Amino acid sequence: MSGEKRGKAAKSKPRKKAPAGPGFVGRLVRGMFRLLWKLTWRLAAILILIIGGATAYYYVGLQAPEDLFEDRQTGSVTLKDHNGQVFAWRGEQYGGELTVAEVSPHLVHAVVAAEDRRFYGHFGLDPRGIARAMFQNWKAGRLVQGGSTITQQVAKNVFLDATRTIERKLKEVPMALALELRYSKDEILSVYLNRVYLGAGTFGFEAASQRYFGKSARALSPAEAAMLAGLLKAPSRWAPTNDLTLAQGRASVVIRLMEEQGYLTTREVVDALSNPAQLSEAAAARAGGAFADWLLERGGEDRFFELVEAEDIEIKTTFDPRLQSVAEDALRTIFEDKVRPGSEAEAAIVIMTHDGAVRAMVGGRTRGGAQFNRATQALRQTGSAFKAIVYAAALEDGLGPLDIVQDAPLRIGSWTPENYGGGYRGPITVKEALAQSVNTSAVRVLEQAGEDRVRALATSMGLTTDLAPGPAIALGTSEARLIEMTGVFATIANGGRVVTPHGIEAIYLRGDPSPIDARDRGPGAQAISRRTAGLMTNMLRAVVEEGTGRRARLPGWEVAGKTGTTQKARDAWFIGYTSEYVAGVWMGYDDNRPLTGVTGGGLPAEIWRAAMLGVHEGLEPGSLQEVIPDTPRVAQGPIGGESSRGGGGQTVVEEVFRDVLDSLTGGGGGGGNPDWNPVSGADR
């Protein structure tokens, strides 16, 4: 081809245009991406620096892991019965340090399965767990699942404020990272196992295991471990002492999680589900709540109250769980059988030995939990139960049980005491006057002994309350606590030596076999002579054998006691003793309403009898230390300006009425406090 042709061809061939530059929108988008990237990595770098700095700050301040196991503000009290078995706990319980290597493997598996299945694989934070929790919460429309790892929970429980705030959640991240850098996984889990709250005042799995199962966390079965691990989400709600069935249901969920994650075989799962964890006998009984509360309410007078501020202590007590169960059953049975349904009447029981060691105490009809303790806190008028002090003072002054005292109308100033049921017997023995609880005779005996002597004796025999003014104290117008009145009768049973009701035998620091305080209780002071005590026992036996307390008789046993009923029957008492035990029963309404158809010789005597039948089961009957009275003499003359012989005895109509009433009710229907309870003793 010629040059000319080649030139033409070249001219005719079109040239390629250069590609057009990006448009405005494209440039804008690319610019925004570049800016966003620069901001992102800069912000990320700043965030990493902040988290790294915070992590380093927390890391430097971390202690050795064992120093983090416990952080309670106060100590605890563990109460043991007189046989050395634990029956109650108070305060913040901590069972002692246990590491992952020491506890049952089933517990480690249960906690990990229930709380953080990837615990041994993540770095303190679990992005998958957080994403899963966010999805579940979004699907439910509310907070139903948390994404915190065990490490984060340790950070929260040990180092941070437990309240749910954004600030606290942000602090959890560097703290969790610091923990992961400073400690091994087992060390983190060990701190967790020792610090978590698990209900019923327990901190850490060792304390919870001892509290609920009566064993160490070293020996937990899969079912028990699952129940404890199940408490972590809601310890108060799922505590087995609150609702065992609910706790077992929660445990079954944890058992399935353990199976799903390969910690249990099919056979182990079947066994755990077929044999769910059960409370220990002490935890299930929840016995001795009133007794334990009584010891602690007296704490200001005892050294252990100061010790518990900083130490874990164990107290060996006088408590007997068998007798406690017997007393509770007696109260429940009498109320179910002889009190109308729906009655709000209350009752309390105290059982002690002759030296004042309290073995059982029922503070009211409600079992378990904190409640008003009517045995130790309620101040109630004592009624005719107080006459035991009046007559003891008179015997000390020289009066004899076979001396004659008038049951006749009596006026002291403007006051005219009357007998229960009306009527008068005329001249009767002092012993009969007490047995039938004759009011006019009791006032005459008080006047003979002197009010000052009676008041002084009441104080020396253990009453701590101020006595009411005037001669009406002979009829029990003063208020006292059931435990103190029971102690008065124990003083008589104890040969006249003062008895102080007590519940502590020895106090120990936990883990130390040597007591720091052993109660060596020697004999008390002689409040009344042994002879007076023996004569009073003889007279109080007559109350039970032929007087107002006949419903308290125990087959084969000698029983001495006294009934008491206050004005309008607002309070009803029976306090009595055998050669082995002393027991007191009070019954009434908390709001001081009158009882209907109830006297001390009725329902209280029946409760006393029902309880003491169980208390004395298996024991050989013994004899009471009594003195047989002799040498009667006539009581002195006029009291209050009236002849002690005035008023005459009962009319024929009154005698017939009394005989008929005796035949219908089993005796005691006349003067004094009869054991008369219409409708089988029902509180109508």
Image (cartoon, rainbow, N blue to C red):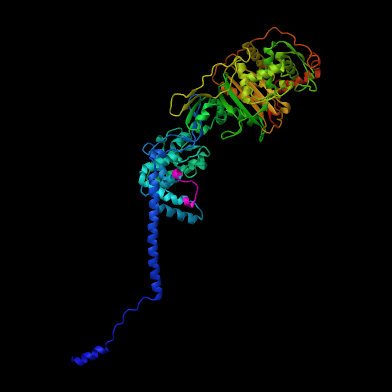
Position above or below: 132 against 423: below
Residue name at image x 61 percent, y 12 percent: 530
Tell me the quarter of the image containing the N terminus.
bottom left
Q: Nearer the viewer, residue 259 or 61?
A: 61
Q: In the shown orientation, is residue 361 left or right of residue 235?
A: right
- Rendered image quadrant of residue 631: top right
Query: Where's residue 96, x and y in %?
Result: 43, 34
Furthest residue in direction top, as rendered: 631
Query: Where's residue 647, x and y in %?
Result: 81, 16
Position above or below: 19 against 333: below
Position above or below: 507 against 369: above
- Rendered image quadrant of residue 608: top right
Viewer can see residue 673? no
How many badges with numbers are in the image? 0
Position above or below: 582 against 7: above
Question: Magenta stretch?
Answer: 157-167
- Rendered image quadrant of residue 41: bottom left
Query: Where's residue 570, x and y in %?
Result: 70, 29
Viewer can see residue 367? yes
Q: Nearer the viewer, residue 244 or 31?
A: 31
Q: In the shown orientation, is residue 301 left or right of residue 270?
A: right
Magenta stretch containing residue 199, yes or no?
Answer: no
